[in-house]
Image: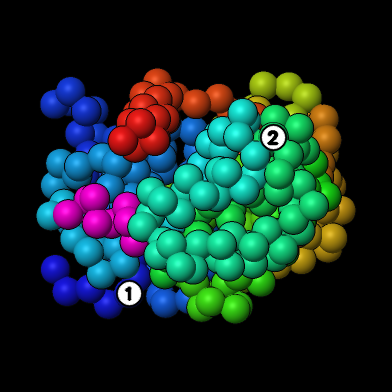
Amino acid sequence: MQATGPVVAHDLVKVYGGKVRAVDGVSFTVAPGEMFGFLGPNGAGKTTTVQMLTGNLKPTEGSAVVAGIDVRADPHEVKRRIGLVFQESTADPDLTGRENLDLAAALFGVPLRTTRSTIDGLLEKMQIGDAADRLVKTYSGGMRRRLELAVGIIHSPSVLFLDEPTLGLDPQGRAGFWKYVLELRKDRGMTVFVTTHYLDEADTICDRISIIDHGKIVATGTPSELKDRLGGDVVTVRLSSAPGPQVETVLGGLPGVLGVTKFEDSYRVKTPRGEELIPVLVESCDKAGIRLAGISLKRPSLDEVFLEFTGREFREDEGMTATDRAVRIGQVQQAFGRARR
C-alpha cells in the first residue's frame, strides 16, 4: 500500500479463533501533526485496532503503515519508532523517576552522549525534576502519568499513541496531562493517536475523530462536523406507559422534526430548534392520548454523536472485554520481556 500519512490503515481485519471478527475492514489516514481521536464502545474493536497499529497484534487481513513502516513486515521497527503510553501504569514503582527514564533510554537506543541532557530536559518539562530521585511508588497519579509520558517520548518518536492515558485521574490531573501533550505536539510536530473514555477530552483536543462499532468505522470527521451531522437539537421523550404504534407517527409528523429514533424506553427526536418544538410536542401528545413521563433537551454534543452512530451511550466506567484483557496481558508480558533483555 502507498502511505500518505504517519498512520495509514487499509481494510484492517482481525479474526480471533477463526470466528470472531473483532475488527472488520477498518481504513483511515492520520495526517502529519494531527491529534486523532479513536473512540468506540466496549468491545467495539478499538483496542484490537490500536494493538495492530502498534505492532503488538498481527492483522488477519489488510495492511497498515505507521511511522513509515509496514506493521506486518516489521512490527519490531514500528515499536522502535513510535511512542506509547498505556492505560495501565508501566513505570517501575521500585525505581526512581530518573532510573525509569535511564532504562527507557537504554531500551530505545538513545545515544549515551545525549541521555543525561535528554532526561534532564524531560524531567524539567514534565515538572517532576524535584522528584527525579524519589521512588515512583511515592508519586501521585498525575506525576506518574507525566513520567510515563516522558518515557514514551524519550526517543523522540514521530508518532505517539496514547491509550486511555488519563483514565482514573481527577479533572486537574487530566487537564495537566493534556497541557503537556499539546505543548509537546506544538514543539515537536508530533502526530498523536489517542483513545479516551472522556468525550469532553476528545471534543476539546482532537482535530478529527473516528468512531468504531462492531469492528467497523461508523463515522469520521472533526468534532464540529460530527455534531453537525445530528441535524440540530435532540429532544428525548420518555413515556409513562407502554408505547403504542402511534407514538412515532405523532412525533414524526410534528413541524420541524427531522427524525425519530426509539432508544430503550424513550424516543429521540431531532429538530433544528428544540425549545420551539417542546410545547407543540406536549400538546400533540396530550391530544393523541400519549402520556409523557418526562422531556429533556440536549444541544449537539459528542455524547449525542456517539449515541446516534452506535445506538449506545458512552459509559466511562465500562470494564474491559475478554479480548481487551488478553491484549493488555500480552502488552505487560512483552514489556517485562524487553526489560529482562
- Out of 315 and 231, give the one closest to the viewer: 315
Kind of residue at disc 1? Gly
Magenta stretch: give its range: 74-81
Q: Which residue is mark 2?
A: 135
Residue 74: image x %, image y %? Answer: 17, 54
Tell me if residue 285 comes above or below residue 289 in the rendering: below
- For disc 1, the marked residue is 5
Quadrant position of the C terminus in the picture: top left
Q: Which dot marks residue 311?
A: none
Q: Residues within 10 Å of mark 1 (few under 14, many from 20)?
A: some
Q: Nearer the viewer, residue 132 or 41?
A: 132
| Sequence-first tag of 2 and 1 | 1
Q: Is residue 109 visible?
A: yes
In the image, residue 302 lies at what x, y percent?
63, 55
- Image side of residue 221 versus residue 286, left or right: left
Look at the image and say whether residue 278 sits in the magenta stretch: no
Q: Residue at x 87, y 53 (%)?
A: 279
The single residue placed furthest to the front in the displayed view is 113
Under mark 2, the amino acid is Leu
Q: Quadrant of residue 335?
A: top left
Q: How is the image coloured?
A: rainbow
- Indicate the quadrant where residue 125 lies: bottom right
Q: Is residue 229 visible?
A: no
